[in-house]
Amino acid sequence: MKKNKINKIRVFIIVALITIMGCSDDFLVDTNNRDLTFDIVFNSDATATAAVTGVYDGFQNDSEGDPGLPVEYNVKGIHRWANSTGLDFFNNENPATNDYLNFSADPSSNDVAVKIWPNNYRQIGRANITLEGLRKAVGAGSISADLGNRLIGEVLVLRCVSYQYLAEVYGGVPLILNTSDDFFKPRDTQDAVFQQIVLDATEAVDKLPWTYVTEKGRVSKAAAYTVLGNAHMWLGQYGDAVDAYQKLEESPVLDLEANFLDIHALANPNGKESIFEIQWAANGDLSWGRNDEVNILQLFAMPTDITGGGGFTGIPTKELYNAFQPGDTRRAATVIAPGEEHTDPLIDIINYDGVDINTCGTVANPWVGGSPETRSGYWAIKSWRDPSIEGWGRNILFGGQGHIWMRYGGALLSLSEAALKDGQMGVAQAAFDRVRNRAWGGTAPAKPVTMDALLEEYRLELAGEFSLWGAIRRSGEARNFIMNNYGLDMPIGRDIYPIPSSELSANPNLVQNPGYN
């Protein structure tokens, strides 16, 4: 049984994800699958690079995905975990039976629970077999040492990202680091997972460049330092976290966007604030039998009154909208309220087919798609940035807008938190102020940095993205966060999700998280 599972993992790589590498935006999207032997894959610079592209592809599962794996990993897995857990974003669910509002995630059906585990272990399997091949190839001289070591650094960080999400979502998980490891082992502790991330990221930082001339979506030194800083914070090693985050200042390209709206602009892929961004291929295919390299989030998050369907995820609350203070430019770049125009200069709402106003509904008649019980009339801006996407039953469903999983604004807030907890108040305040000053377009109202203030800034800075709940849970203040913003008492232990029932059935050595059946 174990041998069969190893062979299946090998197939993900051996059925190589070959891409002609060039200067286009979709260089990390696999477009040509061929049956190749293991030796051939890791016997030239070109094929070894293509195998690493296959590891990146493990994160691209918005639609089709691999056979046997749950689909829509980014939309209904990572995005819902990051945003619905904190109750600032609805799904198309009745509040009376909403898993998130009731803190009652079902291990057999909840999207976060069932999608994140198998998809990340798929990616880890790809990473492990690729690392094995790369290390052997570099040692044998089959590929150039400089390229091979850089590729090893990329894959190490990609594996770190998977283990980071697994630990942040479920707590302790089994560490599978080699193809010879026992795939049916018990869970390792959460600390052990982050200790391994520290080891991998520390090795990776010396192998990676700060930037790439053309292939800017590849893992950089900045991504390695970001996952390293995060792991140190989870381990309570705040001084080490400060050191890791401060290394980002050495990047010749990394900086805050002057205008918050530009961070997620369709015309600004892999911008100067983006540290790690999932790449997508623009695709106008109307059918569901397409591939897994197209971004479906916008269709799911756009007003249903435009698209004729969707509204399944990424629907912000009125409470989130009201949390922004007057003068904070992030609100207009995060949430659009009834009666407001879209803030992206490329989007005029009136240009959508069948729409006769240039606002997102009206105050008197908010757009709720006929479902006021499940939709607030408020819609997300960060994921609604491609004017070509039309909606269900029309021509253009899917787009190429990147998903930013790590960015400099979030890293600065993490630096501020780490410095605050390490007693470095000057560093904490300076990083905190940089984020807030950008939010106000210059100089924000003075505000001392405290843990409560940081929780508020995480919420306003990262709402609608892919990392918010990880920062909230890492702070140790998750239950206070829910109580302060929504007046609800999150039961102890419900800041993490249950292990999928299917995984418990497959591996008798796994133990479910307390409080879940």
Image: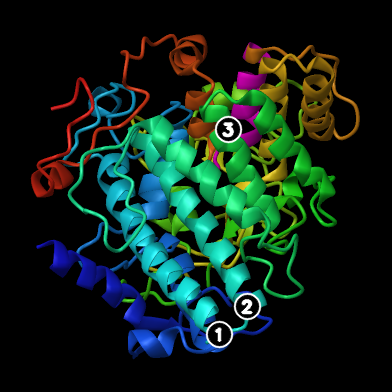
Q: Residue at x 21, y 54 (%)?
A: 183
The amino acid type, in three-letter code, at marker 3 is: His
Q: Which residue is mark 2?
A: 145
Q: Using the rendered image of the protein, determine whether residue 451 is visible from the camera's viewpoint.
A: yes
Rendering coords of residue 460 (x, y %): 64, 29
Picture coordinates of residue 145 (x, y %)?
Answer: 63, 78
Q: Which residue is mark 1?
A: 141
Q: Amino acid at mark 2?
A: Ala
Q: Which residue position is annotated with label 3?
A: 232
Residue 463 is a magenta residue: yes
Could you classify mark 1 by the number of other residues whose Cα lies within 10 Å: few (under 14), some (14-19), or many (20 or more)? few
Residue 374 quadrant: top left
Q: Residue at x 23, y 38 (%)?
A: 499
Q: Which residues are magenta?
A: 452-466
| Overall secondary structure of the magenta section | helix
Q: Mark 1 or mark 3, which is nearer the start of the sequence?
A: 1
- Which residue sits at x=66%, y=16%? 421
- Number of other residues with Cα within 10 Å of mark 3, as a class: few under 14, some 14 to 19, many 20 or more: many
Q: Secondary structure at mark 3?
A: helix
